[in-house]
Amino acid sequence: MRFWKRLRGLPAFPSIAITGAVLMTALLCHGASGQSAGAGSDRASAVSFEDQGESSSLAATAGFERRASGPADPGLPSAPEPAANPDHPAVPWAAVWNQPRFSRMSIGADFSPLGIGLKGAIVLNRLSDLRVTGNFLPLNVGPFEIEGFKTDVNIHMVSASASLDVYPYNSVVRISPGLMFYNGNQVTVTADILPGTNFTLNGHNYWSASANAATGATPLSGSGVLGLDTHKVAPTVSFGFGRFIPRSNRHWSFPSEFGVAWTGAPTADISTSGWVCLDQAQTQCSNLSDASNPVTAQFNSSLQSALTKWRSALAKVPVFPIVSSSVVYSFNLRQP
């Protein structure tokens, strides 16, 4: 304040000169301080540059800790959505959906002891299907000759069944109770015994007679039927692996099946005709149509005794095996 008072007391020109000098000095001082500040800034920049690696590492570590403990970085790309299913646009390829009743079915084929099998299945719900199977095998084996017997075997297999395929816990393991509602399975064997051929029946030796126009003798022949249809309607049960109708968009499947059908013990019947002899010289022979002849009576007794043994052995097998591996194609009847 004293300085400004003295300054006001001076004449005008000296006052202006002094004031200008003061302002010039202030400007020079400000410039010097700016240069000092700039130099300080350069030194700070150099220090910062030298410590850049360490500070960057610390910043990256801190950023990683923040990302690990905090929410996901919204800038990161998200995983792509599964590819769309063309048949079911709302369901990805790998998805399994709940197929409504009667929305999907399958057709397939297999080969088993029951013959060639044709089958079809339809969806009931998520855990079960209804399956219908038809089997057939018209096969003629022969004629062939074995130990003097000219034999012809005719295998006639025909059956139809229905099964409920249940998949516990929605697994690929299957339990299938069912019913064989038609059973016409049987095997027929016919044989002509060459003249003079010897055979044993229930411990007794017999010979097939030679043709003789004088006596009317003819060689022995016979036919037998093995019936596998004691029960025309038979319950079945089986288990297996693989679905007859996949619960996905797959079309092909290869299910297997193992089980039994309670068809009852097989039946065995034999009928004979012609002449049979008790000796090789054919001096003791009889026409089997003559029931009163002792030779015929002995032969029939031996035959019945043998049949009793065979039937007793067959009675131990009251079931017929079901073993198959199928090739099945599935398709939609309507969109789920």
Image: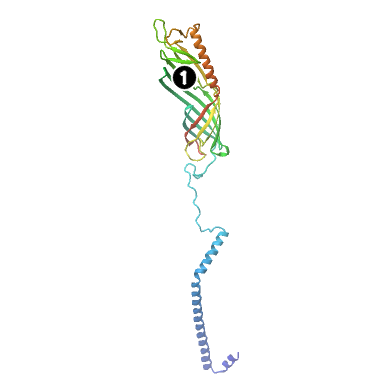
Residue at 43 percent across and 16 percent down: it is: 191
Residue 106 image point, x, y percent = 49, 34
Residue type at tag 1: Thr
Residue projecting furthest to the top: 214
Q: Nearer the viewer, residue 184 or 151?
A: 151
Task: Judge left or right: residue 222 versus residue 5.
Answer: left
Residue 304 image point, x, y percent = 52, 14
Residue 301 lies, with reference to residue 63, above or below; the image says above
Residue at 51 percent across and 18 percent down: it is: 268
Q: Nearer the viewer, residue 37 or 305?
A: 305
Count the numbered circles shown: 1
Residue 83 lies, with reference to residue 231, above or below; the image says below
Quadrant holding the N terminus: bottom right
Disc 1 is placed on an element classified as: strand
Residue projecting furthest to the right: 1
Residue 272 image point, x, y percent = 47, 13
Residue at 53 percent across and 19 percent down: it is: 311
Q: Residues within 10 Å of mark 1 (few under 14, many from 20)?
A: some
Residue matched to label 1:
188
Task: Judge left or right: residue 257 versus residue 282.
Answer: right
Task: Judge left or right: residue 171 versus residue 287.
Answer: right
Residue at 54 percent across and 63 percent down: it is: 63
Colouring of the image:
rainbow
Residue 240 image point, x, y percent = 53, 34
Residue 280 lies, with reference to residue 161, above or below; the image says above
**Which image quadrant for residue 214?**
top left
Residue 77 lies, with reference to residue 221, above or below; the image says below
Q: Nearer the viewer, residue 147 or 32?
A: 147
**Which image quadrant for residue 210?**
top left
